[in-house]
């Protein structure tokens, strides 16, 4: 019994140091997606009923193109907070694996790795709301080179009460999905054959020569 009390006291004394470390960003893999936990594994509080967390991500994407992903956490009196987001293939053989590439747009965010997946998260500079009430982070996402399927963004955020403890914080989650834009190929029409239809013949001469004799061609004599 005494050992349990000592262990609990030690954990409480160590807690502020752990929470202080999270000002520099959480551990990788707390977005709530694909079976991951959320920030609630360390921060505790009453489940929020409001929708303070929003993510502005592209609804569609083209292979290899870059897009800005904006994360906003807005709550009255918010002074300290953080986030983590990942971009992964939503389904298929690659489900749960990294989709494209993430990088921070400024010093308020950073990118770290965990089990082969990139996680964008806040930095110490990006954890303070100035003025209080709203925190915004921007991440640049480069879409996969092959637009094979949907990409899902899982995000978790912590609206802290800034009391240097794990109690009284509000944990939010959100999901956004980007669908690929598939390129369309225009097929040549019947009255405009492809230049490859007549190898070695210029494009302007590739049309059928109705009414004129081609070299080496003999027409049948017409009956009177």
Image (tube, grey):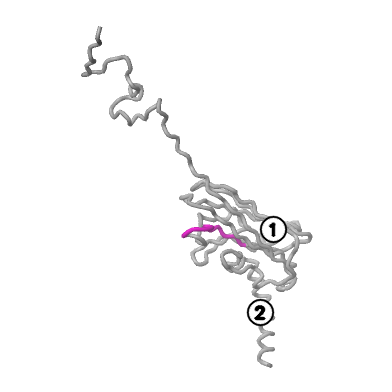
Q: Is residue 75 left or right of residue 216?
A: right
Q: Is residue 135 magenta?
A: no
Image quarter (top left, top right, bottom left or bottom right) of the N terminus: bottom right
Crowd rating for badge 1 (residues with CA inside 10 Å; few <14, some 14–19, many 20+): many
Between 93 and 45, which is closer to the camera in this rendering? 93
Judged from this view, the residue extending furthest toward the front is 224
Callout 2 environment at 10 Å: few (<14), some (14 to 19), or many (20+)? few
Which dot marks residue 132? none
The quadrant where residue 159 appears: bottom right
Residue 157 seen from this side: yes
Compare marks 2 and 1 and give the one earlier in the sequence. Answer: 2
Residue drawn at x 32%, y 30% as measured from the top left: 197
Which residue is identified by label 1? 53
Report the residue marked by disc 2.
14
| Residue found farthest to the top | 224
> Compared to 59, does 128 lie above or below?
below
Compared to residue 126, the image places residue 7 above or below, namely below
Q: Are marks 2 and 1 in contact (CB under 8 Å)?
A: no
Rendered view: 224 above or below 36? above
Q: Is residue 120 left or right of residue 1?
A: left
x, y percent for residue 178: 57, 51
Q: Give the quadrant of residue 73.
A: bottom right
The residue stretch that appears in magenta: 84-93
Q: Main secondary structure of the magenta part?
A: strand
The quarter in which the C terminus is drawn is top left
Residue found farthest to the bottom: 2
């Amino acid at each position: 019994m005494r050992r349990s009390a000592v262990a609990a006291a030690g954990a409480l004394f160590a807690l502020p140091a752990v929470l202080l470390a999270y000002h520099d960003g959480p551990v990788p893999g707390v977005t709530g997606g694909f079976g991951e936990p959320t920030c609630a594994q360390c921060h505790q509080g009453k489940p929020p009923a409001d929708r303070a967390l929003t993510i502005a991500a592209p609804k569609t994407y083209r292979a290899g193109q870059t897009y800005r992903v904006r994360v906003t956490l807005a709550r009255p009196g918010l002074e300290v907070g953080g986030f983590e987001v990942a971009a992964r293939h939503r389904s298929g053989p690659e489900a749960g694996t990294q989709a494209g590439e993430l990088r921070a747009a400024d010093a308020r965010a950073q990118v770290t790795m965990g089990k082969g997946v990139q996680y964008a998260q806040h930095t110490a500079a990006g954890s303070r709301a100035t003025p209080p009430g709203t925190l915004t982070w921007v991440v640049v996402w480069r879409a996969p080179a092959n637009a094979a399927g949907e990409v899902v963004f899982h995000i978790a955020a912590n609206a802290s009460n800034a009391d240097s403890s794990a109690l009284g914080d509000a944990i939010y989650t959100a999901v956004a999905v980007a669908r690929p834009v598939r390129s369309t190929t225009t097929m040549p029409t019947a009255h405009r054959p492809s230049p490859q239809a007549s190898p070695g013949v210029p494009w302007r001469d590739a049309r059928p020569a109705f009414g004129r004799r081609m070299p080496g061609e003999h027409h049948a004599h017409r009956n009177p």
